[in-house]
Amino acid sequence: MKTIDIITLGCSKNLVDSEKLIRQLELNGFSVTHDAEEPTGDIAIVNTCGFIGDAKEESINMILGLAQRKQEGKLGQLIVMGCLSQRYFEELKTELPEVDKFYGKFDWEQIVTDLGGTYHKEASCERRLTTPAHYAYLKISEGCNRHCAYCAIPIITGKQKSRSIEDIVAEVESLVAKGVKEFQVIAQELTGYGTDLYGKQMIAPLIERVAEVPGVEWIRLHYGYPANFPWELLQVMKRHQNVCKYLDIALQHISDSQLKAMRRHITKEETYDFIETIRKEVPGIHLRTTLMVGFPGETDEDFQQLIDFVKWAKFERMGAFAYSEEEGTYAAEHYKDDVPDEVKQARLSKLMRVQQQISADVQESKVGQTLKVIIDREEGDYFIGRTEYDSPEVDPEVLIKKSPSPRKEANLRPGMFVKARIESADDFDLFGEVVKW
């Protein structure tokens, strides 16, 4: 029985793809590990990311490291799949002859067949979870119909292809039966879900259906788009306690000139109104956003508007990155990358310093509150968990110190929900004590 190591790079959408591939390989008798610290299998499959420069560099470095292992006789076969090879298939074949085979993002069936197996279509939606058993990522669509100037995703993944509501609900029911309690709903752009399949936005009816599945404790929404936002989604959030008061929606910038150049189809005034409306409709909601600095033409005034916006919005969760030109995009073909790298990095650092203080204030405001927490893992002297306002991997955690009496936490384990009183906070994490479980 051959052993295969699968290494997943990039986003959680790639992770779901890897989980489906793992299941197909296991059905064919392969032994599969995922993201092993030291790959030791006969075959390595790298599921690559090709979104921005840093992600592409990470993918290339991983491939080169495994190619070195192959040359040393420590690896039999090296396979590359995913977004990077989908986008640069011919170039990679020429530049990386050490790789035995390249595949695109959607070539799972061919991979299984070429490895001597049979693709089981009846199990096409089955996955072997690589996350802790109590949560899973739920990918509701592939591709994107938005054409933001800087983004290569539509080039890589093509137009939006939504899964049916029935298919998604069936997957949720299957995962709940296996012990999953928490779902991170993901897509390249989830607010447009259903327009290709049903002729209209169907994200609100979908989340309503998922929320009604017995055993679903938490649903968290990722990767929305502000223009033409489906406001009925907020009503679903208000009606169902298991739909977390959390929304991840990338805004990118705030100045009108930058938003127009980015082709975001929203104005500064509309963005301010958008934030105000969400906070009014769902009091206590935590907003996660991503912002970009250094896009072509960004002036000092544009950047100051972004700083002022972040200070006003006080995003509970925020990430940012510096623009990198992606070939084939509208920006690469129509704009000059005219903001020097040192200016981009200085602006990025300043923006994140502003956010660090906001994050610290947000965390401090939770001290004294008793919050529902899901336990993710046990680590040293602590149980580590999250609140409904925290998504795995990217958001703050709750650290619960073990008591001197081990009997007190005898029943505490990953996947359990507890009530924890928050005793203190730092810039990013909370420290609490269990008061009820």
Image (cartoon, rainbow, N blue to C red):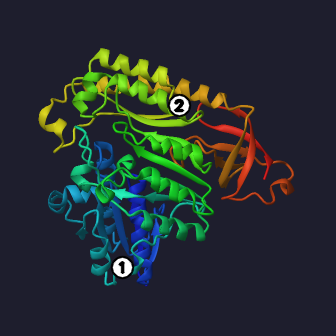
Instruction: Say which element carries label 2.
Output: helix
Q: Nearer the viewer, residue 101 or 139?
A: 139
Q: Is residue 344 left or right of residue 361?
A: left
Residue 435 in view (yes/no): yes
The residue singled out by tag 1 in the image is 121
The residue carrying mark 2 is 279
Classify the position of the N terminus by image quarter: bottom left
Q: Residue furthest top?
A: 301
Q: Earlier in the sequence, mark 2 or mark 1?
A: 1
Q: Amino acid at mark 2?
A: Arg
Q: Residue at x 71, y 59 (%)?
A: 413
Q: Secondary structure at mark 1?
A: helix
**Residue at 54% from the left image edge and 25% from the top image edge:** 358
Farthest residue to the left: give it. Answer: 333
Question: In front: 111, or 313?
Answer: 313
Percent coordinates x, y for residue 302 in the rendering: 31, 19
Q: Nearer the viewer, mark 2 or mark 1?
A: 2
| Residue 73 position in % (x across, y down) | 34, 72
Report the Cα–Cα distance between label 2 and label 1: 44 Å
Q: Nearer the viewer, residue 51 or 276?
A: 276
Residue 367 percent coordinates (x, y): 71, 31
104 up-or-down from 355: above or below: below
In this view, the residue in front, 328 or 63, is 328
